[in-house]
Each structure stands twice: as C-alpha cells, then as structure tokens.
C-alpha cells in the first residue's frame, strides 16, 4: 500500500512546477519519513481516534498512520480522519490513497478543500476542539504582516510569521487535552525574536516529547531540492513537561538512528526569556552553554552587539570603490579572514569606502578595536560563528569606520573595545564549544545579533585574560 502511495508521490512531485511548489509552500513527505513520524505516536488501544492532517497532499502521512493502525500498535475502535488540502489538482489522488483503507479497519474520512487557516479559526470560534491526533507536513511560506491570514490568526490569538508555525499552532488549539501531534517543520522556530510568540504558545500549551534532527540539510525533502533544515517534533497537549527524547539520523533512511533522553532544562533554559529551543546531539555537558564558569550576559559585561548599520543599497550614492579624500573605511565580511583584516581589498567587488558627511555620520563608529561576527556563513562551512578582530592599525589615521549590514559587531555604547577584550571575545566565539552551543538552537546559517545576545559568556576579566594571551602569541 505504502509503495503505491510513494510511487504516486514521486510522480506528482516531479510533475509539479517549482513555481507552484513555492506558491503553495508544497513539499510532499517521502514514505520513509512518513513511516518514522507515524511510529512516534505512543501505542494506543480502544476508543475513537480523531485524526487531523492539515496540508495532506496525496495522503502520505495519513496512510502511514493508518498502516500503523493495521499493524495493531495503534488499535483504535475507529479512526475518523479530517484531511485538509487546498490544491484541488491533487485532491483526487488524496481520495484514492485514503479509500484503500475503508475496508481494512474501522475508518472514515473527510477531505476538506479551501483554506485551512480560515476553516480552523471558524472551528475554534464554534468550540470544535476534539482532535486526539494530528500528523502534519505544513506548508512553508512567509505570512505578510497585513495579509488576511495574519488577521485571521490574530483572531485566534496567534502571532507568527510563517504558514508552518501557523498550521502547528492552529492544530494545537484544535486538539483535545492529551492529544498527540507529530509534525515535520523547519527548525527556524527554535530561535529568533519573530518566532518567540509561537514558542510561547507551544511551550505553554504542550509538552515536547520528541525532537528528531536530520544531520544533512538536504535529505528530508531531497526530491524537491529543499535546503531548509527540518526537524520532526512530537507534542502532547496539556501534559506536564518531562524528559525529551532527541534522535538524529544522517538522512531519511534512518539507518544510523541514534537517540538520547535529556532533562527539559537542557532543551529550554529556565533563565532564558526568549525561550530558545536547544537540540543537543550528544549526552555530554561540556559545551560552553552549560559550563558553570560561563554565565555572564553581555549586559553583565557592559558590552553591546549590533547589526552593522550600513545598508549599502540605501547609501549607494555615498559609497566609493577606493578610499579617497572625505571617505572612511567601509568593512564587509569579505574584508575579514583568519589572518585578520585586509583593507582595502581591490578584488572584493564591493565598495571599500564610504563618504563621511551629514547623511552617513550616524551610521559610523569611531576607529578602534571591535569584535565582528559574520551574519551569514555558507552551508559548507565547518563553523556557523566566525569572529574576527578589527584592529585600528589597519586603517592608518581614519577617524571613523563603517560596518556593512552583513556583520554583527561588539562594542561599548558605540565606542571601541580595548584590544584585549576584542581579542578575548574573538577567541571565545571561535571555539568549538561555542559553535556546538549555537547549533543547539539555530538550524540556519544566519547569526543574528539577538542570537549573540542570548548566549552566555565568560566574565570580563576572563575575556581580557584570554585576549592578553592571544596578543602575546601574536607578538611572538
């Protein structure tokens, strides 16, 4: 049965244009992933299962769930499925997939077209909260701030920026107490300010029972060339939070599946107001995040971190390829390497300077020592966090510096750091332990200033000591 559905999935996926996939945020679930997700539901016996599949596609997830029922591990008296699918072109295939199970177990289903968000909000307004199980591969697409979807979600008390988190939030609100939800979703909700309301809703409404991480970014939806890092999550509505099972596999074959249980305070720190969700992949506790000596916030250190304020396309008329009279250095990520700062850089294909005048003055920093971190790294790089030191000696007698928007910079109230403190920060941030810590809560290649603010650091004295040692090494 699953083989036939998998063949249909590949045929439909290959016949769907990239434009349509992007428009609908539509990526079909491979059979191996669907079977793994269905296997995460705890065994059950008796009663009626009210199953929700929002964004059902051709039915891969629902059918994997029904196969689990046929195996006897989910032994309900009856399964009643509500499957939402907005793409009318594939609803006939969905109906064919589900109809195969009518005579094989106590099973009935309804395929609902139209907009899931609108339908879910209406159901909530009429008090329809009865799903016992939900299995989801929701669409991945941004929601604009003034869209109809955003307004509908606000009616339900949901504030979020992407369809995938909206679908999961609505599914949780439609479930009965004790309901079980399994979803495959992008990892981007685990950190960042935009997903904080969604994290709050998720953590207040449900307990996290299981998180699965694919070590390869490209394998979860490889047929659709999706590079977004995805995770599988199991939630239990209205249950007390306990230990969380973390599993990993290289890809969707699950051949090297590894799992460990963690205390919840390893997943969400009690002292974190942002409620970042960390995903440890090894049972040890040696990374910087948990080391007792590394417990200072940037506020404790008297240090700030900001995104580089020079947005080049907005200040295009003031940019210059080469330094000249009336200009000051403009720094891009390409000016930095492990060896330090190279400026000016003639082969960079970026401006090297910016005019200093009344229009640009407020975006500039005094020349001095700073620690900078690139906001973006390539997927192929070994490290997400790459820190460098800005040394004023590289810029002769330049009075000010410009930092382009693809850099984060550490400073003290828009003034430079001391040489030792700048070097100490760079040494700390470039450690493997910090990189591992960052990967626990960030699944994408972007490093935001907010992420760096949430991290813990050694004391100021310890950072200066590290910096002094680094300076001694550099002088020898």
Image (tube, rainbow, N blue to C red):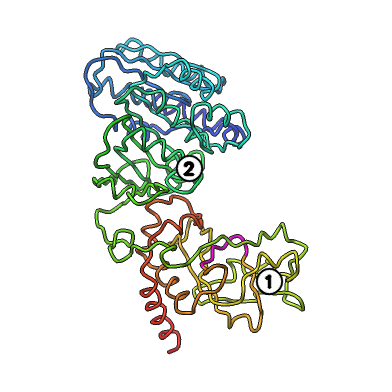
Q: Which residue is mark 2?
A: 195
Residue at position x 26%, y 13% in the image? 77
Against 447, residue 177 (above or below) is above
Q: Is residue 409 magenta?
A: yes
Residue at position x 51%, y 59% in the image? 377
Looking at the rendered image, the quarter that the C terminus falls into is bottom left
Q: Is residue 108 left or right of residue 335?
A: left
Looking at the rendering, which quadrant does residue 53 occupy? top left
Give the x, y percent position of residue 8.
Answer: 46, 26
Q: Secondary structure at mark 1?
A: loop
Give the magenta range.
404-410
Q: Which residue is mark 1?
A: 352
Q: Secondary structure at mark 2?
A: helix
Residue at position x 58%, y 29% in the image? 151
Report the Cα–Cα distance between label 1 and label 2. 36 Å
Q: How many marks?
A: 2
Q: Earlier in the sequence, mark 1 or mark 2?
A: 2
Give the x, y percent position of residue 208.
Answer: 32, 38
Give the x, y percent position of residue 146.
Answer: 63, 34
User: Residue 321: which numbered mark, if any?
Assistant: none
């Amino acid at each position: 049965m699953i083989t036939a559905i998998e063949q249909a999935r590949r045929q439909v996926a290959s016949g769907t244009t990239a434009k349509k996939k992007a428009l609908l945020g539509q990526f079909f679930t491979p059979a191996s992933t669907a079977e793994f997700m269905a296997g995460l539901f705890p065994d059950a016996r008796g009663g009626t299962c009210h199953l929700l599949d929002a964004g059902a596609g051709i039915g891969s997830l629902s059918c994997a769930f029904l196969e689990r029922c046929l195996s006897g591990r989910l032994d309900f008296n009856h399964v009643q499925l509500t499957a939402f699918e907005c793409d009318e072109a594939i609803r006939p295939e969905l109906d064919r997939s589900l109809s195969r199970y009518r005579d094989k177990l106590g099973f009935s289903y309804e395929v609902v077209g139209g907009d899931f968000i609108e339908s879910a909000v209406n159901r909530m307004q009429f008090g329809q909260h009865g799903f016992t199980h939900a299995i989801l591969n929701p669409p991945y697409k941004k929601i604009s701030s003034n869209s109809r979807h955003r307004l509908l979600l606000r009616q339900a008390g949901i504030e979020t920026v992407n369809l995938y988190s909206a679908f999961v939030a609505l599914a949780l609100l439609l479930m009965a107490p004790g309901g079980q939800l399994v979803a495959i979703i992008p990892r981007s909700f685990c950190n960042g300010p935009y997903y904080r309301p969604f994290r709050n809703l998720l953590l207040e409404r449900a307990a996290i029972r299981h998180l699965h991480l694919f070590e390869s970014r490209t394998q979860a939806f490889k047929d659709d060339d999706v590079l977004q890092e995805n995770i599988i999550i199991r939630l239990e509505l209205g249950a007390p939070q306990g230990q969380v099972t973390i599993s990993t596999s290289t890809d969707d074959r699950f051949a090297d599946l590894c799992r460990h249980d963690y205390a919840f305070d390893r997943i969400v720190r009690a002292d974190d107001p942002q409620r970042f969700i960390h995903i440890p992949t090894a049972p040890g506790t040696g990374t910087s995040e948990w080391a007792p000596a590394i417990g200072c916030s940037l506020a404790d250190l008297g240090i700030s971190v900001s995104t580089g304020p020079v947005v080049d396309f907005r200040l295009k008329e003031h940019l210059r390829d080469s330094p000249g009279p009336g200009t000051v250095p403009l720094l891009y990520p390409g000016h930095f390497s492990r060896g330090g700062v190279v400026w000016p850089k003639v082969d960079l294909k970026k401006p090297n300077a910016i005019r200093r005048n009344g229009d640009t003055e407020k975006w500039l920093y005094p020349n001095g020592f700073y620690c900078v971190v690139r906001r973006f790294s390539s997927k192929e790089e070994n490290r997400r966090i790459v820190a460098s030191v800005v040394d004023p000696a590289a810029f002769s007698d330049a009075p000010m510096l410009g930092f382009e928007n693809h850099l984060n910079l550490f400073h003290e109230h828009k003034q430079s750091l001391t040489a030792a403190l700048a070097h100490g920060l760079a040494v700390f941030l470039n450690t493997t332990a910090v990189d591992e810590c960052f990967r626990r809560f960030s699944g994408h290649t972007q490093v935001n200033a907010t992420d760096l603010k949430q991290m813990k650091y050694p004391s100021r004295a310890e950072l200066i000591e590290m910096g002094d040692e680094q300076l001694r090494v550099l002088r020898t």
